[in-house]
Amino acid sequence: MFEEEKSKEQIVLERFLSMSVKSADEVFDAFKNINGAKMYGTEPLKRFLYIPGTRDDKILLVAHADTVWDKNWQPDLNDLPQTLKYKYGVYSNSNKEAQCGLGSDDRAGCAILYLLKNSGHSILILDGEEHGQVGANFLKTEYPELYKEINSHQYALQFDRMGQYDYKCYNIPVSGKFKRHVSFSMGLIDAGKKSKTDIVTLCKDMCGANVSVGYYNEHTTNEILVYKEWLRTYNKVSKMLSKKQERFDLRKNEEEDLL
């Protein structure tokens, strides 16, 4: 029996899931040669890569390159690599001796951004998300003009959520109109405000949401990614981003949430 031919989407996903979870370097290297890409910062964790979009109605696409198994945070972790396994539509790490998971948090998000690199929208890859949004705070503190530019986007979408059907805006004061846009255009459900991620630091004057990319059991050695769920998010967002994008401002009061 012939092996089913892989799509370009699956090939890109597997490329990112095969990168070492012990360092963010390979992820940044994958984006560095894209036209317009610029790396900021040289210190691990305090760094990010930004590719400005070309569209007048561009939005900011966000993912993070680091994992919880980064050697900068866990230097005593062994150097055995994860081994990518694909069975029944599910990716996992078959090398349990590596003491790490698959790395789909957030290599799954990075793969989606790579596939959208020619969409005309801006791309931001951050380091240090897993340990308090280090890269996002570095951007905000050390590059105020770029931080201002980032907040001029129509809105931000981060690709760093478990599951397939939810999104979070956390404590960002987004409007009800923005939530309806995310819900209806991508078929997602609001999962509440608990926790935080990079967009909480990034979104000062713009709305933002973090959406599901199909992984489960993140931060454990039993981490998995369901390919069809990841692909669903990519297909939904790709279709949505091909349309004209509206600017969504933050709400000024609670009453605006109903409009």
Image (cartoon, rainbow, N blue to C red):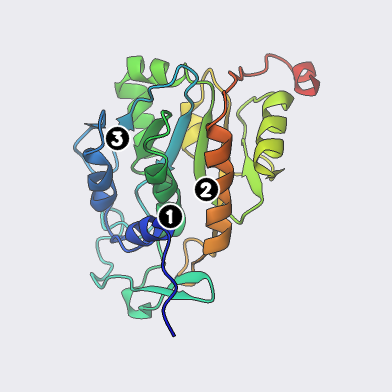
Label 3 is placed on what type of residue?
Answer: Leu
Q: Which residue is mark 1?
A: 9
Find out whether the residues at labels 2 and 1 contact each other: C-beta distance under 8 Å: yes
Label 2 is placed on what type of residue?
Answer: Tyr
Position in image of residue 97 (x %, y %): 33, 79
Q: Which residue is mark 2?
A: 234
Q: Residue at 34%, 23% (x, y): give it.
A: 141
The mark that comes first in sequence, 3 or 1, is 1
Label 1 is placed on what type of residue?
Answer: Glu
Residue 228 shown left or right of residue 178 in the figure:
left
Query: In which quadrant will I find the N terminus?
Result: bottom left
**Residue density around tag 1, few if under 14, some if 14–19, many if 20 or more, within 10 Å:** some
**Residue density around tag 2, few if under 14, some if 14–19, many if 20 or more, within 10 Å:** many
The mark that comes first in sequence, 2 or 1, is 1
Q: Residue at 54%, 76% (x, y): give it.
A: 88
**Residue density around tag 3, few if under 14, some if 14–19, many if 20 or more, within 10 Å:** many
Residue 16 in the image: above or below residue 192: below
Q: Secondary structure at mark 2?
A: helix
- Give the CA distance from mark 2 to mark 3: 21 Å
